[in-house]
Amino acid sequence: MRPELLQPLFAETEALKGVGPRIAKALERLKLTRALDLAFHLPTGRIERIRTDAVSHAMVGQIVIVEVEPFELREGRGRAPTRIFARDADDNTITLTFFNNPGWAKKQLPLGDKRVIVGKLDAYGQELQIVHPEVLEAGVEPPLREPVYPLTEGITNKRMRELVAAALERAPELPEWIEPSLLKRNGWREWRASLAKAHSDEGADNARNRLAYDEIFANQLALLLIRQANRRRKTVPLAGDGRLVDKLSLPFTLTAAQQRVIGEITGDMAQDRPMLRLLQGDVGSGKTLVALIAMLHAVEAGAQAAMLAPTEILARQHLDSLKRQCEAIGVTVAILTGREKGKTRESILMGLADGSIDILVGTHAIFQQKVAYKNLGLVVVDEQHRFGVSQRLLLTEKGRTPPHLLAMTATPIPRTLTLTRFGEMEVSQIDELPPGRQPIDTLVVSDEKTADVIDGLGRHIATGGQAYWVCPLVEESDGIDAAAAEDRAQILKTRFGSDRVGLVHGRMKGEEKDDVMASFANGDLSVLVATTVIEVGVDVPNATLMIIEGAERFGLAQLHQLRGRVGRGEGKSRCLLLRGQTLSETARARLALMRETNDGFRIAEEDLRLRGPGEILGTRQSGEQAFRLASSEQVRDLAPAAQSDAQLLLDRDGGLEGERGQAARTALYLFERDAAVGLLKGG
């Protein structure tokens, strides 16, 4: 139960003075629905003003507050601006320029009457001018230093400042949760003082670091508590005897890295506490095979296994590859997505309940309330970065006893993010590729040469090759994504024939996408035009050419994932990054790195530096909130200390029951990590 002293901060915004339905609705567009959200809505910059009696050329570019006396009016004709000439205390002339509403200007600045104005001082030749100055009411002046907030229609910066101030009044003094020596070493103030300083002071960096640390600390503590609770839980050990794994027909020998992580996973599964392990591996490192061996160990031990994929395309891809291996050794595999209906669905549900289905693959449908397993022993979650902590916990509630959980990601994750997003999990890493995998040649090509690229594509498919053509992502509109892909597909169909070019995008129905993918996998199609729905999981060994249009608009991790769709067979593969004419420095750096390396772990570290933790981990898809106060640099710099501090609290300072632990409990509620933990429901 949330501590009483935090309740004022969790009040709805309409509890604040002057906030009615209209303002509340505007705030909601910024996801500010409670006083807490406003208190954490930190400024992104500051306005600096200077108060002066007289202006000079030395002040050009600055915002000035000055008293003036208008002495001449020149009304503009047509589109010409209206100009009011005014003098300051030293008789300097300032031109006050208005491009519309001259009537308002004349009313606010009558000739011969002194007025205090504020605006940015500019120079027009030797003439000093202010465009559209604000005319202040008598006795009312803006602050010399004012924080600038992210805004939305209907809320001015002044109004936002007032709302934030009202929210900060509700912020209580809180007990200290940071270890005293760490607090002293960093020179951090108390939490409430730091929050106020972050909003008001120009030297707020230290205060912001304190707040970022608090958020990261609460996150680390929550993850460690999950790990601690998991170690206290009991489950059924699953020790396979190898009879099914030994029957697998593998076309190659397992790498040393695969053998190592299989040992770590099966060692965990043989314990009486549920496994909670993250398996990392670069594109093409053989994670799915490792997962299959883990699931067969579960089946050997008399249990069922379930494999969760984030998309239907990926789920059906897994079904095909697992069936090829499992049916030959007598293991039953089924799929369950939102598409399975009626008798087909009922048959699958019966097979799970009576134990005749050994392995189930699917999307979130496999954990719906009506889905009951006879003996679920292992859950494998593919593309783990798409699922958040609370979702991971929900997956472990389906078995009679907690099932073992193996999470996998093909997006290599920097150590800092592994710590902050998966700190409750043990980590295994496949750090080598299977023998014979050739590096993919990557070229960056200007989109001015698109016609040449299409000519090259024609030569490629004329020799029996297959290729992907990925169209750029426009986040704001799936419709635009689809239109871009449809336009490109039409151009390529006109050139190569409609029977040789397929199209896949997110707005198509599942059956349509599967049919096109199957045609491409079977070799019936030579070119697959797609949006990023093919980012993960699609495996067509004969496809050796990847063309990514608008490559500068993709993040590094996404480019690396897309490039990983080729290079899956024996032939030499290439990736062409088609770029636009105007590139930011960040985009230039991304494309240069892609050309330089195939190392996913190096790419992930650089992606974190360039884009930040929310982007690389796909927190928008995970349903779990990214850090609100901590920047990517702060996460990188502060996470190790926060993790050590949280561990110290649990190991030395009495956990949540000691004095510091009670304060830390407040931090968990303040930063809303209590729901993710699921351990504090009793208060």
Image (tube, grey):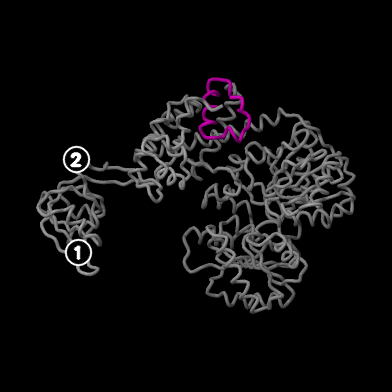
Tag shown at residue 139? 2
Residue annotated with mark 1: 125
- Position of 239 with respect to 157 (left or right) is right
Residue 680 image offset from top left, x and y in percent? 60, 28
The residue sitting at 54% across, 71% down in the picture is: 447
Instruction: Provide the residue span drawn in magenta.
Output: 656-683
The amino acid marked with disc number 2 is: Gly
Point out the image quarter for the N terminus.
top right
Tag shown at residue 589? none
Instruction: Give the quadrant of residue 20.
Output: top left
The residue sitting at 16% across, 59% down in the picture is: 84
N-term mark: 1 or 2: 1
Residue 393 image offset from top left, x and y in percent? 67, 37
Separation of marks 1 and 2 at Cα, in angstroms: 33 Å
The amino acid marked with disc number 1 is: Gly
Q: Is residue 72 magenta?
A: no
Residue nearest the observer in this picture, 151 or 289: 151
Residue 305 image offset from top left, x and y in percent? 79, 43
Residue nearest the observer in this picture, 682 or 174: 682
